[in-house]
Image (cartoon, helix red, strand yellow):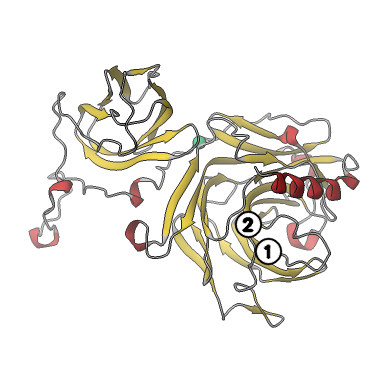
Amino acid sequence: MSLKKLAAAAAVSVLFMGNAMAKDFSGAELYSLDEWMYGKYEARMYMGAISGTVSSMFLYANGSEIADGRPWVEVDIEVLGKNPGSFQSNIITGRAGAQNTSEKHHSVSPAANAGFHTYGIEWTPDYVRWTLDGKEVRKAVKGQQSVNGQDQVAALTKAQGIRFNLWSSESVDWVGNFATDKLPVFQFINWVKRYKYTPGQGPNGSDFTLEWTDNFDTFDASRWGKGDWTFDGNRVDLTENNIYSQDGMLILALTRKGQERFTGTVPVDNEASPVASSSSVAPQPKSSSSAPKSSSSAPQPKSSSSVPMPASSSSNTVWPTVSSSSIPGMGIEAVSQAAAFRAEVQNSTLMLNIPSAGEVSLEIVSVLGKVVVKEAKYLDAGSHTISVENLPAGQYFMNIKKGSQKQSLKFMKK
Ligand SMILES: [Ca+2]
């Protein structure tokens, strides 16, 4: 975090602190320390909702709320407590006191507070696009999104950070009466991904390239800050004490003042991460019982990369070796045992035991959140070797997913 950003963050805090501690409830806001021009953001979330609340993911240019004529730059996904069967998308432009907005609503099923969904925002110079579980629900295109004569896409002229908050609005028409008897309420974030906008480059012609993933196995204070302010129309003081990292989730809470603690149960996210769908995935061989009757409708795999890997326990280079700068490998230590997948240490390789055949996705992520290996393959049951010979020394997480099974293994490359 640069000094300039520190100064800007401090200014925002001072501005908002005037009303701190004056309210009866405590909410939470998670915000990225960095801001970026353009990009794609995805988050896997189980939202919090009781009547009167707002549970969100949004992009925001720091200082937009300062009424000195500067532009307001914001893109929203908000689940409103009175109807968690939908979310509201919005672009906010204009300036403080004279904002232009363009709210729309999109159904969410199962409801946003009854299951995990993958929420996405893409922001480019030409459009803003909202996705739910990988499907587009709204696209605002430059030249076609005019509010009060302002082109909202063109008006997003400043870098934005990504934020998440859980609070209560005094606007009853918008969110419903505040059901304080239903408190506390929680929002769970399983992971967040940020992609750079890389026009003409990116998997499957997407124009976006993954920059980092945060799985929230721990709270990364070099990436995130915790809000400690409030604002007009908000019934809560945002407090650091209502942000928790537990069971691989980042948890935001809305509680009564003085009751800031997590008292709920962390829900289990049973769906596979979208990681596999953005990798080159080998088609799964059809079993005889599920194979289509007409052979013409079942084209055979042609490329060698789609051939399932053999189950041999001695097969090498199941996944490609890492192509980063090479530091002589001295072995690996401290690989934890996993329930669904068993990993063992053997010189500069990880031995991965797969109990049953199927598509397996694998990520190796550095402690700084950099994804250094991302791959998905069909694997037979048995042991497979992952070479990490060329991986620089350091601490890593290996995230393995197969169907609803998932496991993170922490290991140290010496
Ligand atoms: Ca997680």
What separation in Å lies between label 1 and label 2 (alpha carbons)? 7 Å
Task: Name the side, left or right, on which 70 lies relative to 210.
Answer: right
| In-front residue for pair 92/260 | 92
Q: Is residue 126 above or below residue 233?
A: below
Residue 376: where, in percent of width, then height? 29, 42
Residue 43: where, in percent of width, then height? 53, 48
Q: Residue furthest bottom?
A: 149
Residue 380: where, in percent of width, then height? 19, 33
Tag shown at residue 160 = 2
Task: Name the side, left or right, on which 159 lies relative to 300.
Answer: right
Q: What amino acid does circle 2 point to?
A: Gln
Mark closer to the chain start, 1 or 2: 1
Instruction: Pick the quarter of the image with the N terminus.
Output: top right
| In-front residue for pair 85/403 | 403
Residue 60: where, in percent of width, then height? 67, 57
Q: Is residue 49 visible?
A: no
Q: Is residue 363 visible?
A: yes
What secondary structure is found at the residue carrying circle 1?
loop
Instruction: Pick the quarter of the image with the C terminus.
Output: top left
Q: Does the CB distance between marks 1 and 2 fall below 8 Å?
A: yes
Give neighbour class at mark 2: few <14, some 14-19, many 20+ (Cα, 10 Å): many
Mark 2 CB near ligand 1 (8 Å cut): no
**What residue do we see at 69% from left, 47% from top?**
165
Q: Is residue 12 above or below residue 321?
A: below
Give neighbour class at mark 1: few <14, some 14-19, many 20+ (Cα, 10 Å): many
Task: Name the side, left or right, on which 166 lies relative to 109.
Answer: right
Mark 1 CB near ligand 1 (8 Å cut): no
Q: What amino acid does circle 1 point to?
A: Val
The residue where tag 1 is placed is 73
Q: Which quarter of the figure has residue 159?
A: bottom right
